[in-house]
Image (cartoon, helix red, strand yellow):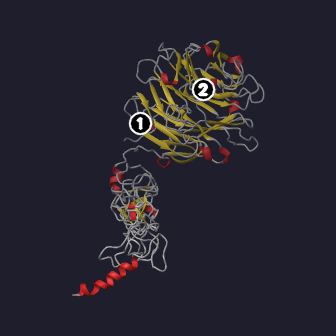
C-alpha cells in the first residue's frame, strides 16, 4: 500500500528536477553544473543523485562526481590519506602520486622495532618491513638500538653515540690489573674494569711487588739484590737458587765497588787486569781516572789507582795500594793503561800509562810512561823507567797503549803507543809507534821507535783501540789498530809482525771497514778461541745498524785475518738491538763460567764529546757476557749474563784473572760517570 500512496509525490519531484537544462546552476530549478541527460527514470528521487544533481554540495554534478553523497570527494579535491578516492582519478591514498598528508616510515631490516634513519619513506600506512621511527644506529644488528644494552664490542649497542668504556651504562667488562713495573704481572690492589687490557694493565693479579720488575711469580732469583724474586718462593728457596749469579748481575751484587769523588773524576774510564805487579800471585786491578786531581795545584793531572791483594766491599780510589800520578796540570794521566806484561823478565808485571795532555814536543803532544813493577805508594810518573814525549803539538800521544809481544827478537814484550791525532799520514789520521819494552830513560818517541804505523784516513783516529795476537798463525806477534773515524765508517787494520820501519795503514795485511757511521774500531779484542793457532779478532762498532738504529755490535773474524773485509763478513756477529750501542768495549780473554771455552764480554757506549784532549764516550749503561763457543749471529737475548748499570756503565770492561781460587775469570766493569769508578764481580758458580 505505501508505494502506491507515494507515487504522485515521486512523479512530481521527477518532473520538477527534469525541468532544468544546461551546465550552469539554475537557481529557479535548483540545478548545478553538469549536463542534463534527460529525465530520470523511475526510482530517481534526487537522493541517489540525478544526472543534474549536486546532493553533497561540493559543486560537482553527476556523473562527474564519483562520490555524489560525500562533499570531500570530487574532481580536483586534494588526495589525502583517508581510504577514499578524493580527487576521483581512480587512485586511492598511496596509489595516487598526488597524495598529501602522508607519514614518514623507516625500513627496519634487522626487525628490532627501530628504523634506519637513512632510509625514510613517506606513506599513508606503514609499508611492509617499516616502522614509524628512525632511531636505529645500526639497522644490520638487531641487538643495537636505543633499547639495547651497551656491551663490550665494536658496536654502539644502545645508540647513544658512546662505545665501550666511554659509555657509563657499559656492562660485561673484564677486570684487569695495573702492571706498573712492566713484568707482565698485575697488582691485585689496582683493578681496572675494561673491555680489553688498557695500556699498562694485564689480566693476572698475582704480582707481589709491582714496583720491581725482577719480582713476580716464577721470576729467576737475582742473587744478592735483597729481594725474594719469585713471589711463590720462600726465603730458603731463594737462597738455594743462588750458589752463583742468575742471568742478571747487578751492581749491588758486586764484590768490590770502587768509588771516587770530585778529585777522582772519570775514575773507571779505564779498568783492567794489570797482571801481578807486586808478585803475590794475585791479579791486580788498575783503574784509570784521567781527570783526577791529587795535587790542588795540578788540576786534572790524572792518576792510575792500582789495587793488589783482592779488594772487597766499598773501595775509595784514594785507598789504592799504588797511585801513579801525572806531574802536570791537564796531563790526563790514565787516559789509557795497559798491563799484564813483564818487559824486563824480573817476575813482576809492568804498566804502560798514557798522558795525552803532557809532552815535551809542544802543548798536547802527549807522553807515555812505562812503570816497572814492583810499585808502591804514591809514584810521580815523571820518575817512570821510560818516559817518551809525543812528536808534535796536538798529537796526544798516550790516547792508546798496549803490549804487543816481541818484535825485536829479544824475547821480551814490546809496547805500542798511539797518538790518535797525529798528522804523519793525514790530518788527525793518527799514528802508532812500536818501542822496545826493554828501553829506559826519557826521549822523543820518534827517537826510540822501532816502527811507526801511519793512519792515512783524515780524522780517522787510528790508535783509538789497540790489541795484539797471532792473526796469521805464524807464531809471530801481530798488531791490530782501530780507527773509529776512518772513512766516516770506522776501520780496523791488522799488520803482521815483526814490525819495522814506517808503514801506511792503507797497506795493512787486513782491513776491516765498517758500515756508514758505525764507528768500527772503537774497540778491539783478540784471542785464539778455537785453539787452531790463529787469533780471532773482535771489532767493536757501537753505532752499526745491523740490529737496528745505533744497535751496535761486535764482529768476530776467524783467523787467519787477511784481506779487505766488511763487518758482515764476520762469521760471528753479536748485534745489539736499536739504541743499545753495543760494542763500545770488548774482551775475549776470559772464562767466567769455568767451562774451558773463551767468552765474549761486551760493553756499550758511542758518542764522542771532546773535553780537552780526552774524549768521553756516553750512552753506555749495560754490559753483556756471551758464553763460548761463539757461533753465528747473536743478540742481547743470547747473553748468559746481562749487567745493567747507570750512566757510562760498561764504558770500559775487562776479564780479571782468578782472584778467589776457583779457576775462573772474574769480571771488571768501569762506570766513570758520577765518580762511581767501577765494579768487581768474583765468579761463584751457577
Residue 644 coordinates in the image, percent (x, y):
50, 44
In the rendered structure, find residue 426 and report the number of the disc placed on it.
none
**Foreground of the two, 329 or 279:** 329
Residue 482 relative to residue 22: left or right: right
Seen at 62% across and 15% down, the residue is: 506
Q: Is residue 412 left or right of residue 659?
A: right
- Residue 283 appears in the figure: no
Q: Which residue is mark 1?
A: 638
Q: Mark 1 or mark 2, which is nearer the start of the sequence? A: 2
Q: Nearer the viewer, residue 205 or 667?
A: 205
Residue 680 spot, x, y in % from top left: 50, 42
Q: Quadrant of the C terminus?
A: top left
Mark 1 packing: few (<14 Cα in 10 Å), some, or many (20+)? Answer: some
- At label 2, counting other C-alpha atoms closer than 10 Å, the crowd grade (few under 14, some 14-19, many 20 or more) is many
Q: Nearer the viewer, residue 643 or 205?
A: 205
Please tell me which residue lies in front, 42 or 610.
42
In the image, residue 156 sits, relative to residue 508, either above or below, namely below
What residue did someone put label 2 on? 489
The image quadrant of residue 638 is: top left
Place residue 619 in its image quadrant: top right
Mark 2 vs 1: CB contact within 8 A: no
Where does the image place residue 665, in percent across and percent down from the top left? 44, 35
Q: How many marks?
A: 2
**What percent of the width, then of the height, locates residue 37?**
39, 68
Q: Left or right: where does residue 534 sit relative to residue 265?
A: left
Amino acid at each position: 500500500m505505501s508505494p502506491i500512496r507515494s507515487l504522485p509525490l515521486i512523479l512530481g519531484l521527477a518532473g520538477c528536477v527534469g525541468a532544468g537544462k544546461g551546465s550552469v546552476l539554475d537557481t529557479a530549478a535548483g540545478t548545478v553544473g553538469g549536463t542534463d541527460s534527460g529525465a530520470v527514470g523511475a526510482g530517481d528521487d534526487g537522493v541517489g543523485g540525478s544526472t543534474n544533481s549536486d546532493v553533497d554540495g561540493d559543486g560537482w554534478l553527476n556523473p562527474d562526481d564519483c562520490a555524489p553523497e560525500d562533499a570531500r570527494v570530487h574532481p580536483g579535491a586534494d588526495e589525502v590519506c583517508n581510504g577514499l578516492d578524493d580527487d576521483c582519478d581512480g587512485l586511492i591514498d598511496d596509489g595516487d602520486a598526488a597524495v598529501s598528508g602522508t607519514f614518514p616510515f623507516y625500513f627496519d631490516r634487522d626487525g628490532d622495532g627501530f628504523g634506519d634513519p637513512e632510509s625514510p619513506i613517506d606513506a599513508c600506512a606503514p609499508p611492509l618491513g617499516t616502522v614509524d621511527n628512525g632511531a636505529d644506529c645500526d639497522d644490520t644488528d638487531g641487538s643495537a638500538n636505543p633499547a639495547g644494552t651497551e656491551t663490550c664490542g665494536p658496536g654502539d649497542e644502545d645508540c647513544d653515540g658512546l662505545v665501550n668504556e666511554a659509555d657509563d651504562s657499559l656492562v660485561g667488562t673484564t677486570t684487569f690489573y695495573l702492571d706498573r713495573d712492566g713484568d707482565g704481572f698485575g697488582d691485585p690492589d689496582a683493578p681496572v674494569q675494561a673491555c680489553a687490557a688498557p695500556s699498562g694493565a694485564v689480566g693476572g693479579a698475582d704480582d707481589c711487588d709491582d714496583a720491581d720488575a725482577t719480582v713476580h711469580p716464577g721470576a729467576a732469583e737475582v742473587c744478592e739484590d735483597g729481594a725474594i724474586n719469585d713471589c711463590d718462593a720462600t726465603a730458603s728457596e731463594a737462597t738455594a737458587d743462588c750458589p752463583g749469579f742468575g742471568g742478571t748481575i747487578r751492581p749491588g751484587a758486586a764484590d768490590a765497588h770502587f768509588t771516587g769523588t770530585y778529585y777522582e773524576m772519570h775514575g773507571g774510564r779505564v779498568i783492567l787486569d794489570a797482571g801481578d805487579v807486586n808478585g803475590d800471585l794475585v791479579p791486580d786491578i788498575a783503574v784509570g781516572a784521567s781527570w783526577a786531581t791529587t795535587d790542588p795545584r795540578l788540576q786534572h793531572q790524572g792518576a792510575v789507582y792500582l789495587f793488589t791483594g783482592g779488594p772487597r766491599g766499598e773501595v775509595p780510589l784514594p785507598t789504592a795500594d799504588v797511585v801513579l800520578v801525572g806531574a802536570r796540570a791537564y796531563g790526563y794521566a790514565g787516559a789509557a793503561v795497559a798491563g799484564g806484561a813483564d818487559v824486563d823478565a824480573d817476575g813482576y808485571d809492568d804498566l804502560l800509562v798514557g798522558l795525552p795532555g803532557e809532552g815535551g814536543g809542544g802543548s798536547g803532544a802527549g807522553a807515555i810512561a812505562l812503570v816497572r813493577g814492583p810499585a808502591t805508594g804514591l809514584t810521580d810518573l815523571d820518575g817512570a823507567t821510560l818516559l817518551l814525549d809525543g812528536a808534535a803539538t796536538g798529537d796526544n800521544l798516550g790516547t792508546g797503549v798496549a803490549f804487543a809481544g816481541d818484535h825485536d827478537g829479544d824475547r821480551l814484550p814490546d809496547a805500542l803507543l798511539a797518538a790518535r791525532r797525529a798528522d804523519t799520514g793525514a790530518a788527525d789520521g793518527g799514528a802508532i809507534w812500536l818501542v822496545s819494552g826493554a828501553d829506559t830513560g826519557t826521549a822523543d818517541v820518534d827517537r826510540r821507535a822501532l816502527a811507526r804505523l801511519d793512519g792515512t784516513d783524515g780524522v780517522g783516529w787510528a790508535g783509538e783501540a789497540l790489541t795484539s795476537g797471532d792473526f796469521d798463525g805464524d807464531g809471530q806477534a801481530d798488531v791490530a789498530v782501530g780507527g773509529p773515524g776512518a772513512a766516516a765508517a770506522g776501520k780496523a787494520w791488522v799488520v803482521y809482525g815483526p814490525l819495522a820501519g814506517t808503514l801506511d795503514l792503507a797497506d795493512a795485511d787486513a782491513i776491516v771497514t765498517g758500515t756508514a757511521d758505525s764507528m768500527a774500531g772503537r774497540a778491539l779484542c783478540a784471542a785464539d778461541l778455537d785453539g787452531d793457532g790463529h787469533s780471532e779478532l773482535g771489532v767493536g762498532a757501537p753505532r752499526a745498524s745491523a740490529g737496528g738504529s745505533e744497535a751496535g755490535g761486535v764482529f768476530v773474524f776467524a783467523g787467519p785475518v787477511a784481506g779487505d773485509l766488511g763487518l758482515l763478513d764476520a762469521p760471528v756477529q753479536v748485534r745489539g738491538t736499536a739504541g743499545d750501542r753495543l760494542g763500545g768495549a770488548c774482551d775475549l780473554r776470559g772464562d767466567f763460567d769455568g767451562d774451558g771455552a773463551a767468552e765474549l764480554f761486551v760493553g756499550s757506549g758511542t758518542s764522542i764529546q771532546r773535553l780537552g784532549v780526552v774524549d768521553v764516550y756516553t750512552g753506555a749503561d749495560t754490559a753483556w757476557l756471551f758464553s763460548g763457543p761463539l757461533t753465528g749471529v747473536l743478540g742481547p737475548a743470547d747473553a748468559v749474563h746481562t749487567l745493567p748499570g747507570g750512566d757510562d756503565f760498561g764504558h770500559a770492561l775487562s776479564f780479571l784473572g782468578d782472584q778467589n781460587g776457583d779457576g775462573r775469570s772474574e769480571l771488571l766493569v768501569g762506570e766513570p760517570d758520577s765518580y762511581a769508578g767501577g765494579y768487581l764481580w768474583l765468579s761463584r758458580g751457577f
